[in-house]
């Protein structure tokens, strides 16, 4: 599987959001997209899965423009797990996860679909929630159920918008570890938006660091997560050490004024 973005530009009105984004991903990689709020990370993955149409440029999968896929055909190839929100609905957890099978089976779920849905819940250790109502769950449980729905879709490219939000550190690491292993074991290309630089460093094969609508750095965690890059992109001082073979960032709050621009 080869995903290629060529000179992608997008904006709202006269406000540019993405500026000439180009990169290629081949095969089963686990990629984290990093960057401050508002730099276009979510907009970028929305251009990949055709939620948004770029103003210019092209997104291709194995050389074929995503615009040429039917919606159902594209959904069999590209899965998407949105950022967790307060939106909820009165549906059982297993029925929520079965929505991920729609591109394959439509509204007629087979025994295999049900087996895949329960398997996704088991992977995330939430099979005990199967018959709970989705709107009765905690924010962290919501996040895991939505991730299970994405895994049940069995796509070859999986786009994740902050999949570890609302999770405590143990469950953040557990989910990121699972995603990395699934990428390698099941030959899945996983692209994850992440705000935790250390989680991204520990589990990613590649990091794309964005700043002001462009790609600022692209490479391995060792190549991208440097004190100089973090200062330029996030505006904070940091110290980078190596921990278990991966960069680990320790940030300083020197120079940060929490009351800047606020009236007391």
Image (cartoon, rainbow, N blue to C red):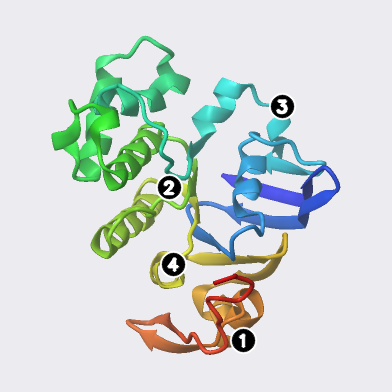
Q: Residue at image x 27%, y 60%?
A: 168
Q: Earlier in the sequence, mark 4 or mark 2?
A: 2
In this figure, which residue is indicated by the disc labeled 4?
196
Query: Taking 24 as reference, is 264 left or right?
Result: left
Cα separation, mark 1 vs mark 4, equals: 17 Å
Which mark is in front, 3 or 1? 1
Place of residue 74 in the rendered image (x, y in percent of width and height, measured from the top left)? 58, 29
Q: Earlier in the sequence, mark 1 or mark 4?
A: 4
Residue 44 percent location from the top left of the image: 65, 49
Q: Nearer the viewer, mark 4 or mark 3?
A: 4
How far apart are labels 2 and 3 at the CA level?
24 Å
Decide which of tag 2 and tag 3 comes sooner along the chain: 3
First in residue order: circle 3 vs circle 1: 3
* Label 3, label 1: how far apart the Cα atoms are: 41 Å
The nearer-to-camera label among 2 and 1 is 1
- Residue 99 lies in quadrant: top left
User: Residue shown at 42%/89% (left/top)?
Assistant: 241
Residue topped by disc 2: 187
Give above or below for 214 relative to 133.
below
Q: Which residue is outermost to the front?
A: 264
Foreground disc of the pair 4, 2? 4
Name the residue tied to disc 3.
Answer: 68
Q: Residues within 10 Å of mark 1 (few under 14, many from 20)?
A: some
| Label 2: how many Cα within 10 Å (few below 14, some 14–19, many 20+) | some
In the rendered image, which residue does mark 1 sit on? 228
For residue 100, above or below residue 244: above
In space, the residues marked 4 and 3 are separated at their CA atoms by 35 Å
Instruction: Please report whichever mark, 4 or 3, sits nearer to the chain's N-terminal start.
Output: 3
Q: Position of residue 262 (x, y in %)?
A: 59, 70
Extreme-right residue of the structure: 14
Task: Indicate left or right for 261 with 33 as reference.
Answer: right
């Amino acid at each position: 599987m080869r995903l290629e973005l060529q000179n992608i530009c997008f904006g709202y009105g006269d406000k540019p959001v993405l500026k000439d984004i180009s990169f290629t991903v081949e095969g089963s990689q686990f990629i984290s997209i990093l960057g401050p709020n508002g730099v276009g990370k979510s907009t970028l993955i929305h251009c990949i899965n055709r939620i948004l149409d770029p103003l210019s440029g092209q997104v291709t999968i194995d050389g074929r423009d995503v615009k040429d896929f039917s919606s159902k055909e594209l959904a069999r190839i590209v899965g998407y797990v949105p950022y967790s929100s307060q939106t909820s609905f009165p549906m059982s957890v297993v029925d929520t996860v079965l929505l991920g099978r729609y591109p394959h089976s439509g509204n007629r779920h087979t025994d295999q679909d049900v087996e895949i849905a329960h398997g996704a819940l088991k992977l995330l250790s939430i099979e005990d929630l199967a018959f709970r109502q989705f709107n009765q769950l905690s924010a962290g449980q919501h996040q895991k159920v939505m991730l299970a729905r994405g895994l049940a879709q069995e796509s070859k490219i999986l786009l994740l918008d902050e999949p570890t939000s609302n999770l405590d550190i143990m469950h953040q690491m557990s989910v990121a570890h699972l995603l990395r292993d699934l990428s390698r074991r099941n030959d899945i290309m996983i692209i994850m938006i992440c705000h935790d630089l250390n989680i991204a460093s520990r589990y990613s094969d590649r990091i794309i660091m964005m700043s002001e609508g462009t790609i600022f750095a692209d490479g391995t965690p060792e190549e991208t997560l440097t004190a100089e890059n973090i200062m330029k992109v996030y505006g904070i001082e940091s110290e980078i050490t190596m921990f278990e073979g991966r960069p680990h960032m320790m940030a300083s709050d020197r120079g940060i004024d929490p009351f800047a621009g606020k009236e007391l």
